Amino acid sequence: MSLLKVLEGSKPQPSKPSMVAVYRRGDTVYMHPQVKTTDGVFIFAEPVVQLDKDDTQVPVHLIELLSVRRTIVAHPTSWRGLTDPLLKAAKVRSFNAFAASTKLVEIERDDDGISLLPTRNGGPKEGFVHLNEKRRHSRPVVEDVRAGLEAAFADCE
């Protein structure tokens, strides 16, 4: 094996696609990137951005979070404390408390633009369930992302 192949194998691999979770809880939007683990699971990553749901900067921050390439991380051996920054921002003690009456739209950035995937809140037993049939697509421009995100939240169950 050539040295170049060995060196290429040791480089951090980017987490593709770029993903962001956007939650609407009351009048507040919380968003954070998601990063892929070595087992192929997308998990919480920082930073957590917290804005009023009507803030005109919501799509701007979303596009910025999607533009940052993150590297694949080791799969957690413990899930304890993983979402603590999100819970702290929302001033709640548990993810179940956070998720109650919360809507989630998962956002992906790929070569074709932005994909917005609404979810159904299945409570503590099911979690957030993808509504694949309601997936929307948007160009990565502020006005399109704003309209697509509003429509995706309206599609959440």
Image (tube, rainbow, N blue to C red):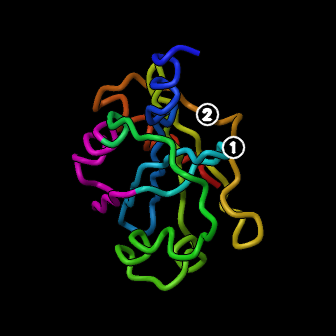
Q: Which residue is drawn at 55% across and 31% down?
A: 136
- Identify residue for label 2: 135
Q: In the image, what residue occupies the spot 43% across and 44% down? A: 150
In the picture, measured across the screen, residue 147 lies left or right of residue 155, that is left
Task: Say above or below: 103 vs 72.
Answer: below
What is the distance, in whole Å, between disc 2 and disc 1 at their CAs?
7 Å
Relative to the observer, which residue lies in front, 112 or 153? 112
Residue 54, given in percent of the width and then of the height, sits at: 28, 54
Question: Regarding mark 2 in the picture, which secondary structure is present there?
Answer: loop
Left or right: where 155 falls relative to 18: right
Taking 121 as reference, is 23 left or right?
A: left
61 is within the stretch colored magenta: yes
Q: What residue type is labelled 2?
A: Arg
Residue type (three-letter) at the residue carrying disc 1: Leu
Which contiguous range is marked in magenta? 46-64
Image quarter in which the C terminus is found: bottom right
Q: Where is residue 99 in the image (x, y as percent from the top left)?
A: 56, 70
| Of residues 136 and 106, the one drawn nearer to the viewer in this rendering | 106
- Residue 145 rendering spot, x and y as whole percentages: 37, 34
Q: Residues within 10 Å of mark 1 (few under 14, many from 20)?
A: some
Q: In which quarter of the image is the N terminus?
A: top right
Mark 2 neighbour density, 10 Å: few (under 14) some (14–19) many (20 or more): some
Which quadrant of the view contains residue 69?
top left
| Residue placed under numbered mark 1 in the picture | 131
Q: Which residue is drawn at 48% across and 69% down?
A: 83
Q: Position of residue 2 (x, y in %)?
A: 53, 14
Tag 2 near tag 1, CB within 8 Å: yes
In front of the other: 25 or 61:
61
* Residue nearer the viewer, 120 or 80: 80
Residue farthest toward the left in the current orientation of the protein: 56
